Image (cartoon, rainbow, N blue to C red):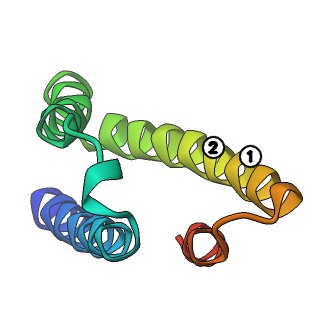
Amino acid sequence: HVLVVLLEFCASHMKNESSHLEMFRCIVPEGKRTRLLPVWKMAGFGLGFVPTLVGGSRALYVTVEAVETFVEEHFREQIVRLKWEKRCPNLVRLLEHC
């Protein structure tokens, strides 16, 4: 039962993150996109897999919460800066949505 819940959580989280990535692809011009996306994807997988392997499902949930908290703070900082500079309104809306 724990494995089923864990797999459902992973699938849901992956779907959510994939939709965010697609939204960013729609508004960030191709020349301004990172070339490191494959590295970030592998790092993200490892950051979830290793704690789960070592500490079980609780470790995965704690890790995801820590990463999401970091990302939300980073997005907030970007939103404040972009609004202050009156730049990139579409990106601001996307960051607020994510």
Give coordinates of residue 4: x percent, y percent. Answer: 11, 66
Give coordinates of residue 12: x percent, y percent. Answer: 25, 73
Give 82 or 11, whichever is nearer the viewer. 82
Give coordinates of residue 68: x percent, y percent. Answer: 50, 49
Q: Looking at the rendering, in which quadrant would you find the N terminus?
A: bottom left
Q: Residue at x 25, y 59 (%)?
A: 30
Q: Residue at label 1?
A: 77
Label 1 sits on a secondary structure element that is: helix
Quadrant hosting residue 20: bottom left
Q: Is residue 81 left or right of residue 7?
A: right
Q: Which mark is residue 35?
A: none
Q: Residue at x 23, y 36 (%)?
A: 40
Q: Residue at label 2?
A: 74
Q: CA distance from mark 2 to mark 1?
A: 5 Å
Q: Amino acid at mark 1?
A: Glu
Q: Is residue 60 left or right of residue 46?
A: right
For mark 1, does the 10 Å Cα neighbourhood hold few (<14), some (14 to 19), or many (20 or more) residues? few
Q: Residue at x 13, y 28 (%)?
A: 53
Give 37 or 19, whichever is nearer the viewer. 37
Quadrant hosting residue 74: top right
Q: Residue furthest top?
A: 54
Q: Is residue 62 above or below residue 16?
A: above
| Callout 2 touching callout 1 (CB < 8 Å) | yes
Q: How many marks?
A: 2
Q: Residue furthest right?
A: 84
Quadrant hosting residue 27: bottom left
Give coordinates of residue 29: x percent, y percent. Answer: 34, 63
